[in-house]
Every structure is written in structure tokens, then in C-alpha cells.
Amino acid sequence: MNHAIACEALAKRYGTLAALDGVSACVPRGRVIGLLGHNGAGKSTLIKLILGLIAPSGGRLDVLGQSPWRAHALRRRIGYLPESATFYASLSGRELLDYLARLKQAPRGQTQALLERVGLAHAADRRIGTYSKGMRQRLGLAQALLGSPELVLLDEPTTGLDPQATRELYRIVGELRADGRCVLISSHLLAELEPHIDGALILRQGRLLAAGSLDALGEQAALPARVLLHPRGDAAGELLARLDARGLPAQRRPDGRLELQVPRAGKLPVLRELLADPAVADLDVREPTLAQLYDWLGAGQRSAAEACA
Amino acid sequence: MNTILIVARKEFRDDFRNRWTVALTILFALLALGIAWFGSAAAGRVGFTSFDATLASLTTLGAFVIPLIGLLIAYDAIVGERDDGTLLLMLSYPLARGQLVAGKFLGHCGALAVATLLGFGLAVAIMQLMQPPAQTLQAWLHIGRFILSASLLGACFVGLACLISVLTVDKSRAAGLALIGWLLSVVLFDLALLALLVVSGGNPVERAMYPYLLLLNPVDVFRLVNLTALGDGAGNDLLTGMTAHHGYSPLLLCLVLLAWAVLPFAGAMLAFRRKEI
């Protein structure tokens, strides 16, 4: 019951094609989790399984403490924003939310509050057909929040949003987390997503490559940090040689800075040394990003079998 | 149950919003008045003549038009939502798939029934006003039967449209299938029966089976419901002549029509439940 989503050896096959295979993971409540993977990695399949729209072919899946397959009442506690959401163009934003609120048995007063929360109050009575992509996406977010769901699934929520609207969206995601709700965000935009998530589920070709908090994943991958050094005056050559002798081969960048890879384990001693070095004018530490982690896991690569075929 | 009504209400209001209901009401009223006024033009007169004859002509016309409209109004019920990308959204709400189909079916049937009632009702009211001798209880009974059976006929084809909509992968295919469905049930079925009669030369087995074969098509059941009630002299001798020896029970005919309204719809519910999304 502590987990919003728990699955064990979860599988979904379409004919002979395995869309998901042997996925075991837990998503705790009160967390924002990124669901990552390339197209065809199984993200949509996993979302459909969580929503109970398709039946698992094998394994076990618990969502908010029950099996979701055909559990209609459970969906009252789940909010879902479909990818590139389109809605009934002839309805107004308010009419759509009123209709969906009725279906979800959400309090009627919530419609107005949600329209204001996503910044659509001014356009509430216009036809959805006249909305911009960003406005439709915000309307989609508003409907996903109807009925104060315990679990919110956002599929590519920021496609088509401008930076301001994207910030607004992640602000709302932050509010949901503070409220103890679980948010699962599927996205390709790793750099944009990274600051806002607590953990990730990374899928490739239906298999779970990695799952856990970003810290734990970073620890596990032990990717080196990148350090950029600004040499003082014309001390670049001298610094380069000294680093080389120290076993830290650095590379000269076009902008005159030196870049070196520092293994995770020895990072602090090396940094102390560099700070004390008179030839270093400034330094910049770049921790491994989610995108690098993703590449390291090979999530973006095709499997050997597929590449040969 | 409540969920079905929420969906039905939305579809019903959408049909109003899209001007479907208004357009159909006007169409039905104009058709009815036109037939009433020009129905006896062949005899060299215009103007309101026999009320029963008008109703018989309306039945023939309705048998063509109502199935087409039922199919048109609902062929995109499910496949349209899939094309627009709203199907997944709807199914992520706490409603069963069957409830979604049922709501759409009821909403469109309701819109069609309202258009039938208003359109034909208005026309008939005008005719009755202008034709004092036709103001009989009998006439109103015929009208009531006509409107009710027309609504049921509409429901048969709305149900068929829902079934097509569930089974097809895109809107254009659904539209094509809907037209084929119309052609089969409205035109080809009767032609095939006729051909069968001609080829077999009307042997006794054939003649005994014919009245039952007609029950296999809701369009023919609709005709029978209205024409057998109107009786002779309403200008529908062709159909009644062939089935004259067979006494249809009006109740049975209504039940068969009702069954036809439920059957394709039930098929749609079943097919949608089994469909992989």
C-alpha cells in the first residue's frame, strides 16, 4: 500500500511481439518519476496497463493497491494527460471540464478552480477549436487533475509548450508532489525533465533497464564528472603537463579551457588539488546528466539482434 | 447507469450543436408536407388528399431516408474519437467501455427520435389542420405508430453504425461500410427477395417462407408495421398484395423491430469490450 505502482515480472505481448517483458519496479507515493525510453520502448504500453485499458499477458501489476484491469472505479483516483491531447473542438474548455468532472464524479466547483490554476480562466468559454497547442495542453493538465487523483500520468506533457508554460507545468507538478501525490511523467526531453524528477524508470524494447532515484542511478553508473578549467594567463601548457603527470589527461577546448574527466570516487581529492593549483583561475564542475546516464545505460541504442536484422 | 446518461446527454447536445437535429427536423417536415401536397400530382391534382395515402408514401420514403440518417449520425461514434485521439482519454475515465457505446447509442437515438417527432409531428399537425375530415383518432394512432416505428428503425441503424464504428480502423472506412450497409438493407435485400420470387416462380414453399424472410430486414419490418395497419386503398398494394395471405400480428412486428434495434447495438457493445486498444 506504500507504493503507488508496483509490478512484478509484468509482461504484455501482442501476438509474438513483446511490448513489455519482465518489468519489475515500485513507484512510491509522493514522488515524481520520469518514464524514459525511446519510441517503441514500451512507455505507452505501460501507461495503458496502469490505466487498466489492456490486460497484462503475464506478471502482476498493482496500482494504488489493486489490479487495474477493468477496475473502472480505480480510475477515479488516477489522472491522465494523453500525448498531444486533442479534445472535442466544438465544446468550450469549461464545458469539457464540466462533462469530464461529471464522468469522474468530481466536485462541480473544481472546474473553475482548475481553469484558474492552469491559467485558462480567460479562455474558459471559448471553443477548444480556437485554442493554441499550449492552451490545449494546459486544458489537458486541468482535466488530469479533476477529482484530486492520487496518481497522475503525464504523457509528453510539455510538447508544444513555451518555456513559461513549461515552468508553470512543473510548478504544478511540484505542488502535486508536496501534496503527497505520485506523478509519472513520460518524456523525451531529458534535460528539461531532470531537475523536476526524483527518480526514473528507463525502458528499452520492453525491458526495464534501470529504476530508482536519480542519486542511486548515478551511484550505480559511476559516471565521471567533467571539470572545466580556466588556466591563468599563459599557464595552460604547464597545467596540461602537470595534469598529465598526475594521471588526469585533459583536453584543450576551442575556447581555451581545459576539460578533464574525473572519476566519481576520486572527485573531491582532485578538486581540492585543482583549487590549490595557482595555474587555475576558475573551474566549473559538471555532474553527469540524466542524458549521459541514459546513454550509458544504452537506452537509446538498438540491441545487437535488432541492428543485425 | 448514471454514467451512460452523462455520455448520452453529451452526444444528444452535440447533435443539437452540430445542427444535425434541426436539419433533420426541417428535412422530415418538408418531405412530409411535400408528399402530402404533391402526392397525387400524377392524378392531375395538387393539394392535400387522402391522409392514409400520404402516410403510406411517407413510409416508403422513410424506409429509404431514415436508415441513411441513422448511419450518418453515428458511423464515427467510436472510430471518430479514435481518429481525434480522444478515445484513450475517454477510456481513462471511470467508465466501462460498454457504457461509452451505450451512451453514444442512446444519445444519437434520442436526437433522431426528437427530430422524427418534431419534423413529422409538425407536418402532420399542419395536414390535420387543413383537412378537417382527417381529424380522427384513427389517424393519430397511425401517426403515433409511424413516428414510433420510424424512431425504432433509426435506432436499428444507429446500432449498426456503432457496430461499424467499433470494428473499423478509420473514419473513411467506416463511412464506406455504412453506405454499403445502407445499400444492402434498403436496396439489395428487397431486390434479392424479388429475384428469388421470380426465379422460383412462386412455388408454395417459397410463398410460405416469403413473409418470414421479410422479417430479416428491419426496413421491411418498418414497412409492414405501417402498411399492414393502414390496410388496403392506401396505394401500397404491391407489398400488401404479396403478404396478404399472411396475417402479421402487429405486436409481433413491433417486437421484431425492437429486436432489430437491440441486436446490432449489443454486437457493438460486445465487439468494443473485446477490442485491443
Image: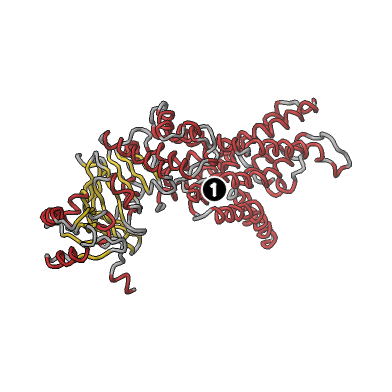
Camera-nearest residue between A20 and A215:
A215
Q: Residue at x 70, y 49 (%)?
A: B242
Instruction: Report x, y in % for residue B264.
Output: 51, 47
Q: Which residue type does callout 1 highlight?
A: Asp
Instruction: Report x, y in % for residue B209.
Output: 61, 53
Camera-nearest residue between A47 and B177:
A47
- Whether residue B1 is visible: no
Camera-nearest residue between B222 and A79:
A79
Instruction: Report x, y in % for residue A164.
Output: 41, 41
Q: Residue at x 11, y 57 (%)?
A: A266
Instruction: Report x, y in % for residue B114.
Output: 61, 33
Residue beneath label 1, please?
Answer: B76
**On screen, A27 above or below A91?**
below
Q: Residue at x 56, y 38 (%)?
A: B109
Q: Is residue A130 left or right of residue A276?
A: right
Q: Residue at x 65, y 56 (%)?
A: B188
Q: Secondary structure at mark 1?
A: loop
- Whether residue B32 is visible: yes
Q: Report crowding for label 1: few under 14, some 14 to 19, many 20 or more residues within 10 A (C-alpha).
A: many
**On screen, B130 above or below A177?**
above
